[in-house]
Structure formats: C-alpha cells, structure tokens
Image (cartoon, rainbow, N blue to C red):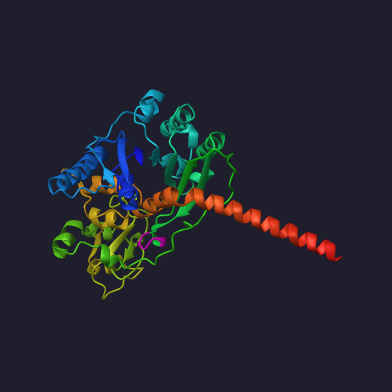
Amino acid sequence: MNIIEYFSGIGGMYYSAKLSGVPFTVKQSFDINTTANTCYNYSIHSLSNTDNNNNTTNSKSKKKNVVVNNKSIDALTVKDLESYKANTWLMSPPCQPFCRVGLEKGLEDNRTNSFVNLLTLLGKLESPPTYILIENVFGFEKSDARELLIETFMRLKYQYQEFHLSPTQFGLPNQRLRYFCIAKLSDKPTIRKINILKEIPTFKTIEPSAISQYLDTTNPEETYEKFKIPQETLLSKRGMLFDIKTMGEKTTNCFTRSYSKFVEGTGSVLQLNESLKPDASDPNSLLPLRLRYFTPKEITRLHGFPEEFKFHPSLTSQQCFRLIGNSLNVKIVSELIKYLYNHFENQEEEQEEEKKDNSDISTTSTTSTTTTQ
C-alpha cells in the first residue's frame, strides 16, 4: 500500500495499516489539528527512530518520518495528489455534520468541504487510488454526504461495501458503533448495494475480554489519585448519571471528546471498591466506591491502539481525551484493510459465480420439470 491518510488525527489509520500486516508506505498524512499532529509526529516518528536504532524495523511498513501536513484538505489540488502516487486513501472525515450535537446539517455544514473536495478530485485524477477506506459516525449512512460518496463510486466504477461495526465484535470491551465503507477500483459497472453489513465476512466475532485487562496496573493508587472523580462532581445533580463499570465487566460506553468534562453520555467510569453498590436515590453512596476516570492510555487500549502508542508529554489529560474521542478503533480498521486487500474482490466474484450457478441450477430444474410434464 502506498497510503495517503486524510484527517490523520493521532495516527489511527497508520496503526491500523501496521496491525493489518499488509506491506505499506505512508506517502503523506493530512490534518489541520496541530495538537493531533504533535501527537502523531511524536508517537510514530519516535517509534520509527527507535526501531531504526535497534535495527528492528518492520520490513512491511516504511515511514520516512513524513511530517503531517496541516494544509487544509479542501485546498488540495489534482497536482498535489498526483505527486504522491498513492494507491490507497484512508480517511475519517469530521463527524460533527452527521451528529445530533452537530445539528446533522450534512453537506450544508462547511466542515464537509474537505470531504467533498476529495470526492471531486477523485474523478479528475489520471491515476486514482485503487483502494479507499472511510470511517465515520453511525448515522452517516443517512446523510446527503453518503449519497454523494456512493454516486461518486458508481460513476467511477468503484466496487464498494458498507459496514456497521463495534469494537465488542472484535474482543474489545467498548461500545462504539461506527460506519465504515471500503471501495476498490474496478473495470466493471458498480451495482448499488442496499444492505449495510453487520460483520466482516472473513472475520469471526470474538467475545470481549474483561475491562481489567486494559487497565494501568503499575501504580494503581497513584493512578486513582490523579484520575479520581471530585467529590463535588459526585454529589452534584448529575452525579448519579455516571455510567459505572467494575473491572470484571466486559463492556464500556463510547468515550467522546468531552470525557471528564461532562457526565452523561461521554463514557464510562471505573469503580475500584467493588464490595459496595450505589444507591440510585442517594448521591452520598457514590463516595466510598472509589470512582475514577479511565486514563488516556487505558482508553487507547480499548480503541485497539498498541502499547507503543504514546501521547506527547506536553498534552494535558483533557487534551488527550479530546484526541482519542475523535479517533477510531484500530482493530476494526486493520481487519477491514485485510479484507479489502486480500478478499474483497475475490469474494465479489465468488458471489457472482454462486448466483450464476444457482441460476443455472434453477433453469435446469425448470427444464426437467417441463420435460417430465
């Protein structure tokens, strides 16, 4: 894969490509978020330098310290993209235009301009990418942006498949249902698909493991003191709205960019004292539970990021929460990359052959019945 990462964030697509095992080179990464770029450059480039110094560079991935380009994607041109000679586009466009919080304005939201520009450029390239993978929020499939995407794929003869997938299907104890679309350039006309798959055909669902396997265990008391939920927050009107999880449970709620800033709907919190249970009518019952927020590192683990990933030391916990809340699940995307590269086109052909065989059998059966009569 010769990859361009669009909306590269903290490197979720990079780590997904690496985990997939498909040989790849990152030609360029684009993101206008300078905080995310600081994290990406620090984590991935320091990893590359360490590997090079130890002579343990993975021959399947080549990253020559390409610094993330913060040029606005809606300002990119055909000349820009042709120069990278990339055969793969990986992207996770801004999700706000497709969320309730973002008022679901779709293409009327200026934050979709960069995505629209990429689709426009796609039809003008002399050497368009062979492979495309897109991740976005659940609900994107109902938007006018999705309609534009599918219309573009059909016009340019990209075979495509859409998915709704959650980390809990991949062994990770985190609920984060997302929309995904993979596409491959073809010489055949594109057939519009109605169904959005709920699983990857070549991947068998794995039961989530316990939350305890993803926790920081080196200095548990120090971690608690740093991330404990303040008493005034627990005793506030919204204190009883926390989604509380114990270490043995096998699911957590979706962590958003507002985690630790707001209580309701931003992610789960961890209960360390499991001998007690909260009383829904008494906020004071929360105090002895020893409740804390999940750490940024723990949340990256729940998102499938490897241990080698690290945030820049200058970032605050709140900044880290915002970044990971805007990111993606590495495990899911890695499996989609494997499917896209190794099975997608072959399976499409097998399905067509199966339909043809079934049609032949049906025709033969009808003929035999007619002859008998």
Q: Is residue 105 left or right of 5 when viewed as pictured?
A: right
Q: Quadrant of the N terminus?
A: top left
The one of 327 and 266 positioned closer to us in this rendering: 327
Residue 147: which quarter of the image? top right
- Which is nearer the eye, 338 or 295? 338
How far from the left and from the top, in percent, is residue 368?
Answer: 79, 63
Q: Residue at x 41, y 31 (%)?
A: 114
Q: Residue at x 22, y 60 (%)?
A: 231
Q: Is residue 170 visible?
A: yes
Position of residue 264 relative to residue 6, above or below, is below
Residue 196 visible in the shown view = no
Q: Main secondary structure of the magenta part?
A: loop
Q: Quadrant of residue 52?
A: top left
Image height of 294 relative to 179, above or below: below
In the image, residue 70 sits, relative to residue 96, either above or below, namely above
Return the x and y of residue 13 as percentages of the image width and height. Answer: 33, 45
Is 165 on the left or on the right of 226, as rendered?
Answer: right
Q: Which residues are magenta?
A: 169-174
- In the image, taking residue 295 as reference, residue 81 lies left or right, namely right
Q: For residue 188, which quarter of the picture?
A: top right
Q: Nearer the viewer, residue 302 or 95?
A: 302
- Residue located at (58% from left, 47% from top): 193
